[in-house]
Image: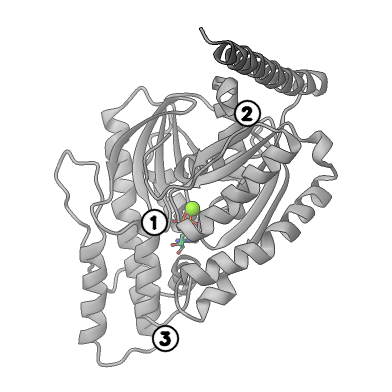
Amino acid sequence: MKISTKISLIYYSELACSITIVESLNYLTVILRSLYNGFMKIMAIETSCDETSCAIVENGEKVLSNIIASQIDLHAKTGGVVPEVAAREHVLKIIPVLDECFSVASCGWEDIDALAVTRGPGLVSSLIIGTETANVISYVKNLPLIPVQHIVGHIYSNWLDIEDDVQFPILVLTVSGGHNELILMRGHHNFEILGETRDDAAGEAFDKVARLLGLGYPGGPIISKVALTGDKGRFKLPIAKTGRESLEFSFSGLKTAVLNETKKAKVVDEKFKADLAASFQEAVVEALSQKLIMAVKKFPNVKEVHIAGGVSANKRLREVVAKNLPENFKFRYPKLIPYCTDNAAMIASAAYFAYKKNSESFSPPVNIVPTTSFEIF
Ligand code: ADP
Ligand code: MG
C-alpha cells in the first residue's frame, strides 16, 4: 500500500472515530438531560398549509405552549389558499411564533430535548419553511430532529392534555381538509389504513359547499354555524354507497347534489342556505359515522374510537358518533378546538412517541426534506 493511501486511511478512520464519539456524546447528553429532568420537552414546528405553528409539549401529552398564526383572513380574500402567498407569510411569521412559543411556555433552548417538524404531506412551498428552520436549529443547537407525517400528527392530537391512558387497539377516523381515512392503530406508530376517500376529503367538501353558497372560507366552521338555524330534513341529499363491505368514502356526488339544488332553487335566501347547509352537514356526518360504525363491527377487539383532523371539531359529528357507538368503546376527540385543525402540539406528541420507539435515528446531523406523498414514514 502506498504511504499516502495509508495516511488517508488513518486520517479517515480517525475522523470516523471522532464523528462517532461526538454523535454518541450528543446522544448521551440528550438521554442524560431527559433522565435528569424526568421529562422530555419537544419543540415542534408545523407549516404544512396555511398555519404557522410552534409548540412545546412535555412527554407527548402536556402542552406547555401551542402558538398558531392563522392565515385565514389572508386566504379568505381568494376563497382558498394560494401557495406562494402562504409560503411568504410563513417566512414572516415563523420567528415571532417561535419566540412567543418560548415565552408562553416560560422556557428557553436549554430546556428543549428534541425538535420535531412536519415533513409532509402538504404544500411544498409551505413545508420547506418549517423543515429548513428545523434543520438549521437542529444543527446549531445540536438537537435530535424528528420528522412527522402530518396525518400521523393529527392522530396524536388525541393524546394532548389527556389525564388517562389511551388503550390500543384504536380505530381512528381522520377527517381534515385534504385527507379522510379510517385507520386501525395496534400500538404507537403502528397504522393499518382500512379505507380512504375515493375523491374529496370531508373538509374539502365543507369548503367547496360553503364557497358554492357564498358563505366564505374555511367552510366547516361557517357551515356548522349556519346549519344551527336550518332544517336538516328539507333536502334529501345522497350518501355515497361505496359497497357493502367497503370502508371507503366518497363526497363528490353529494357536492354535485348540492350544486343541483342551488341551480333548481327559485330563491336563494338565508333560509335556503341554512336548510341546505344543515342537510349537507347531516349527509356528511351520516356518511362518516356509518363507515366508522361498520369498522367497529369488523374489529370488535378495538378498545377506543378516535376522530381527528379539522372536521373532528364538528359538534354534530361528535354527537352522532357518540350516539351510534356501542357503550363499551371509549370515544375520543381532541380536547380543544385548536388541536383539531393544524397545530404544532400534535406534531410534538407524534414525535415523542416515535422517539421513544427509536431514538437513535434522529440524532444530529439530520437534513429533513419535505414531501407531498401521503406515505407514512
Ligand atoms: P388540513 O390538514 O388538510 O390542512 P385541517 O386538519 O387543518 O386540514 O382541517 C381543515 C379543514 O377542517 C377545513 O376543510 C375546514 O373546513 C374543516 N373544519 C374546521 N372546523 C370544522 C367544523 N366545525 N366542521 C366541519 N369542518 C370543519
Ligand atoms: Mg391538517
What amino acid is found at the position of numbered circle 3 in the picture?
A: Glu
Residue at 43%, 47% in the rendered image = 371
Q: Quadrant of residue 352?
A: top right
Who is closer to the viewer here, 323 or 162? 162
299 w.r.t. 229: above or below: above
Q: Which residue corresponds to mark 2?
A: 164
Gap between marks 1 and 3 measured at Cα: 28 Å
Residue 67, position in %: x, y?
70, 55
Q: Which residue corresponds to mark 1?
A: 178
Left or right of 329, for residue 294: left
Left or right of 198, for residue 162: right
Left or right of 172, for residue 164: right
Q: Which residue corresponds to mark 3?
A: 270
| Precedes in sequence: disc 2 or disc 1 | 2
Q: Secondary structure at mark 2?
A: loop
What amino acid is found at the position of numbered circle 1 in the picture?
A: Gly
Marker disc for residue 53: none
Q: Quadrant of residue 86?
A: bottom right
Q: Residue furthest front?
A: 2
